[in-house]
Amino acid sequence: MKFENLGLSPELLRAVADENYTVATPIQQQAIPPVLAGEDVFASAQTGTGKTAGFTLPLLQRLSTPNPKQGSRSPRALILTPTRELAVQVSDSVNTYGKYLPLKSTVIYGGVGINRQIQALKKGTDIVVATPGRLIDHMSQKTIDLSRVEVFVLDECDRMLDMGFIRDIRRILAKLPESKQTLMFSATFSKEIRKLASTLLENPVQIEVAARNTAAEQVEQMVHLVDRDRKRELLSYLIGFQNWRQVLVFTRTKHGANRLAKQLDQDGLKTSAIHGNKTQAARARALKEFKQGKIQVLVATDVASRGLDIEELPYVVNFELPNVPEDYVHRIGRTGRAGNEGLAISLVSHEESPLLQDIEKLLKRKLTKSVLPGYEPTAANRLETESKPRPSRSNPKPRRSRNKGQTTSKARPKLAPKSDASGNRKRHQSR
C-alpha cells in the first residue's frame, strides 16, 4: 500500500517523498490508520520494520490541527524511549517528517548538560522525545509541564522493563492527563508487557506484524563452536580473512566490551566500544565513524545497541550469548533490515550450551552449528554439531596458536596475528 492511500496530509506525503519512500511497510500500513483515528494502539514489530515512522507520521498529523484548549506551548505529545541513541533516532524522524509543519520538537536525555534543554522547553515545544531518567530530572526541577499531553508514546517498552524503568514510567504517567491517546510499541508481547498494556491502554488496536519472537527472515544465522579462551582469536580470523567491514559485535558487559575492543585493535582491526559508561559525545562519534567506514568493528552491549540505526549492516556477531533469549532476536535484528540480507554469527563455548538451548527453544528451531578447522573445541568442551570440520580450498587451515598472549601490531592484517612456539610473530597468508 502506498503512503498516499493512508490518509496522510500533503505536507507529510511531501516529506515522505523527499526520503524516496513510496510504499508503506506492514507495520506502517496497520498502525497509521488507527493512530490517525485517535485510538490506542498496542503494536509488536521486529527492529528494522519502519515502526518509528509508523507512529511519528500520524502523530505529526494529529498535532498539526491546533487545539483550541491549548493555551501555551507546553508539550502536546510525549515519546518515551529507553536509550539516548533511540531518543536521537526518534527525534530525527520527527524532524524529518515534520519539516513542512509548524511544529517544534525537543529531545531530552542524560549524559549532556541540562541547561540547554531547559531553555528549549521554556521557548515552547509541541513534541518531547525523552529518556525516563532525564525526564524525571526535569519533572523534579519543574522545568516541564506534562498536563497538556494529548498523545503518549511508549517505544521499545520491552526494553524499558528489562532496564528497570517501570517505576519511572509510573511516576511519569501520574503527571499525564487521563484523557490522552496512548501508543505502545514493543519487539515482543511478553506476559509482563501485556500486563502493563492492560493498565495503560483503553480498548487498544492490537498489531503484531511478525510472528512472536521470530528472527528476521533475511538474516542467515550460524553458530561456530569454539573454546571460550579462543573466541577472540577466531573472531579476528573471521573478520581479517573474510575482509569483513561494518561488523557489530555484542558482549554481555561494559568491561568485556572494552577489553575485546582493545584486543581487536591490537590485532590490527580498527575497533571501538560503545556502552553506557561512554559519554554521549563518544558514543555518537564512534557510531558516526562506524557508519563512515573509519571503524571496522563496533563492540557493543545490549543496552547501548538499542536504537542504533545503521543502514545495510552486513554482519552481527554474538561474541557472548545473551542471558535473556529475547535479546538474541534484538541483536540479530540489527542486520537484515528493510529487506537487506545479513549474517549473524554466534561464537558459542561449552559453558553457553544452556543459553543456546533457550534461544533455539524461543526460535522453535535448531541453529546450524559448525567447527572451523584449527579452532576445534577441546574434547571436554565439544557440543553436538551438524557438520564436522574439514579443510576448505578457499579457506586454508590456520595454524593453532600456542601462545595465548596478545599481539601489539598496529598494521591492519588480512588475518589475526599468531605466534609460533619460539614467540616469533606470524600471520596467515591468503592464497
Image: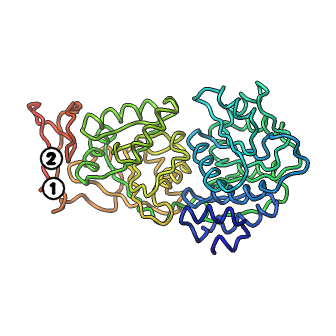
Could you say which disc has been placed on residue 94 in the image?
A: none
**Which residue type carries mark 1?**
Pro
Depth check: 68 or 157 in front?
68
Q: Residues within 10 Å of mark 1 (few under 14, many from 20)?
A: some
Seen from the viewer's position, the closer of residues 282 and 372 is 282
Question: Are the two marked residues, 1 and 2, in contact with CB atoms closer than 8 angstroms?
Answer: yes
Tell me the kind of residue under disc 2: His
| Mark whose residue sits in front, 1 or 2 | 2
Q: Is residue 229 above or below residue 41?
A: above
Query: On the picture, is 412 further left or further right than 384?
Result: left
Q: Which residue is mark 2?
A: 428
In the rendered view, would you say 49 is above or below 114?
below
Q: Which residue is mark 1?
A: 396
The C terminus - image quarter: bottom left
Q: Nearer the viewer, residue 396 or 354?
A: 396
Indicate the quadrant where residue 49 lies.
bottom right
Q: CA distance from mark 1 to mark 2?
A: 9 Å
Give the colour scheme of this rendering: rainbow
Seen at 59% across and 48% down, the residue is 92
